[in-house]
Amino acid sequence: MPIFDIDHLRTWIGRAQEKSDSIQPRLVESFNAIFNASSGLALGDPAPLGIHWCLAPDIAPMSGLGPDGHPARGGFLPPVALPRRMWAGGQVDYSGGLRVGDIITRRSRIEDVTEKLGRSGPLVFVTVRHDYLTPHGTALSERQDIVYRDQEIKAAARPGMQPPTSVAADHSQSIDATATLLFRYSALTFNGHRIHYDLPYAINEEDYPGLVFHGPLQATFLLRLAAEISDAPLQSFGYRSVAPLFAGGQVSIHATGGAGGINLWVADQHGAPTMKATVASV
């Protein structure tokens, strides 16, 4: 089992970085294609919800990648000596909108590093705050929780291990969980993590039963559903991953509620929840 010094890792608290990007029409068009959607491409048009997860990605040269396809550890994020890094959850608070043509500045800061003991062994949670600034002001602020864990989570990695939800949905949609969908989202976000597109690696090296859905891809599907059924602009979006989601067949997204508050979840091919979210509207 890896040994790490939590006190050393906590010295990363307060570390900050700033990165810039722009919302170009090509990015918006590519993003919409993944979701079989369309939106305005002219400068000043509203940018689609969830596109902020495609902005200012970590870009490392090939020589700077680890064996999993992620940039090598260290730098902005602490060098946690546990093999798996995943989204655990977070919350997005909206204070303005992103627009096509905006030049955005993302200011990021490590807010906390904590250690917990889970069923699979030690866990390290890193909390990051991202603020997205535009020429019109702050568009949104996000708290992002990243979890590092040991590789021995075989039972949790099998589909259908979580019980299907018993809540009846007011709104539901199906998604074709294809490898092409995951590959295109990886390309759009410049995410080299091999569990999303390299099936032999996902199975043989990380002991998953298939290609793994991206956390932000699931979250974006939920955001889009919430926007469809809400009569008011979204104010906050809180999300939490509860189980891995894998490619193959059809998965589904669901929502209950309406004005003022919506509960949403992603369900795998067996009906078991993999991500849960809540949305508040203005």
Image (spheres, helix red, strand yellow):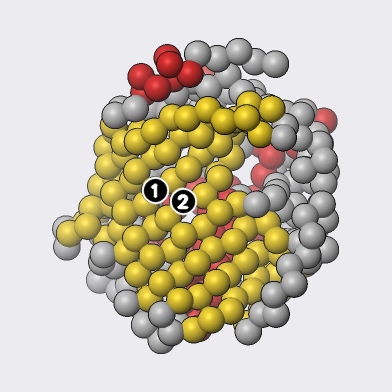
Mark 2, residue position: 90
Type of amino acid under label 1: Arg
What secondary structure is marked by label 2?
A: strand
Residue 42: % across, % down: 31, 73
Q: Residue at x 27, y 42 (%)?
A: 107
Q: Residue at x 33, y 46 (%)?
A: 130
Mark 1, residue position: 143
Determine contact: label 1, label 2, CB under 8 Å: yes
Task: Assess disc 1: are there few (<14), some (14-19) or many (≥20) residues with their C-alpha within 10 Å of its C-alpha.
Answer: many
Res. 238 visible in picture:
yes
* Residue closer to the observer: 166 or 99: 166
Q: Quadrant of the C terminus?
A: bottom left
* Residue closer to the observer: 184 or 207: 207
What secondary structure is marked by label 1?
A: strand
Q: Residue at x 70, y 69 (%)?
A: 252
Q: Residue at x 42, y 67 (%)?
A: 49
